[in-house]
Image: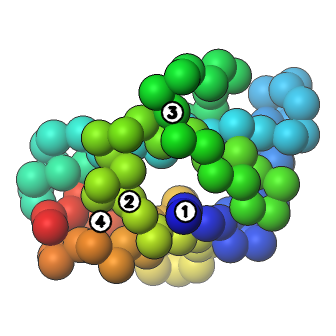
Amino acid sequence: MISVTEKAKDKIIELRKQEGKAAEPNIRVSVKGGGCSGLMYDLSFDESITPADQVFEDKGVKILVDKKSLLYLLGTTLDFSDGLNGKGFQFINPNASRTCGCGESFAV
């Protein structure tokens, strides 16, 4: 399962409204090679669900994940921070053995 916090859900809905889209969002979360730790998170809005996608729903947000990325993301929570130490979406990933300072890349 992949989950979202209330703050992340609220920010996702706010961003969707700014784009003039429906408030019920689909977000795609994936993992790609790169970044200073070896793997990077990728987060985007996506209107289409493919047969190869795993679909999770938490707090009204549909989370789409391809099967390859799912291996790295199981148990992850998507959060949003707007504090002084950084603003943006954060991935709380129990599978990551290390992360970089920016929080956008990780290693397993």
Query: Of callouts 1 and 3, which one flags the residue occurring earlier in the amino acid sequence?
Result: 1
Circles 4 and 3: CB atoms closer than 8 Å:
no
Under mark 1, the amino acid is Ile
Q: Where does the C terminus fall, quadrant-wise?
A: bottom left
Binning the other alpha carbons within 10 Å of mark 1 as few (below 14), some (14 to 19) or many (20 upward) gives many
Under mark 3, the amino acid is Asp
Along the horizontal axis of the image, is 106 left or right of 12? left
Query: Of callouts 4 and 3, which one flags the residue occurring earlier in the amino acid sequence?
Result: 3
Across and down, in percent, residue 14 comes to: 82, 48
Across and down, in percent, residue 27 comes to: 62, 40
Near-viewer residue (79 or 101): 79
Query: Of callouts 2 and 3, which one flags the residue occurring earlier in the amino acid sequence?
Result: 3
Query: What residue appears at the point 61 percent right and 43 percent down from the top-left corner?
Result: 55
Query: Of callouts 4 and 1, which one flags the residue occurring earlier in the amino acid sequence?
Result: 1
Could you give the CA–CA distance between mark 4 and mark 1, rounded to whole angstroms? 21 Å
Could you give the CA–CA distance between mark 4 and mark 3, rounded to whole angstroms? 28 Å
Label 3: which residue? 53
Across and down, in percent, residue 28 comes to: 54, 38
- Helix, strand or loop under label 2: helix
Query: What residue appears at the point 70 percent right and 37 percent down from the top-left corner?
Result: 26
Along the horizontal axis of the image, is 32 left or right of 20? left
- Helix, strand or loop under label 3: strand
Binning the other alpha carbons within 10 Å of mark 4 as few (below 14), some (14 to 19) or many (20 upward) gives few
Instruction: Point out which mark residue 2 bears.
Output: 1
Query: Of callouts 2 and 1, which one flags the residue occurring earlier in the amino acid sequence?
Result: 1
Under mark 2, the amino acid is Leu
Circles 4 and 1: CB atoms closer than 8 Å:
no
Query: What residue appears at the point 46 percent right and 27 percent down from the top-left corner?
Result: 52
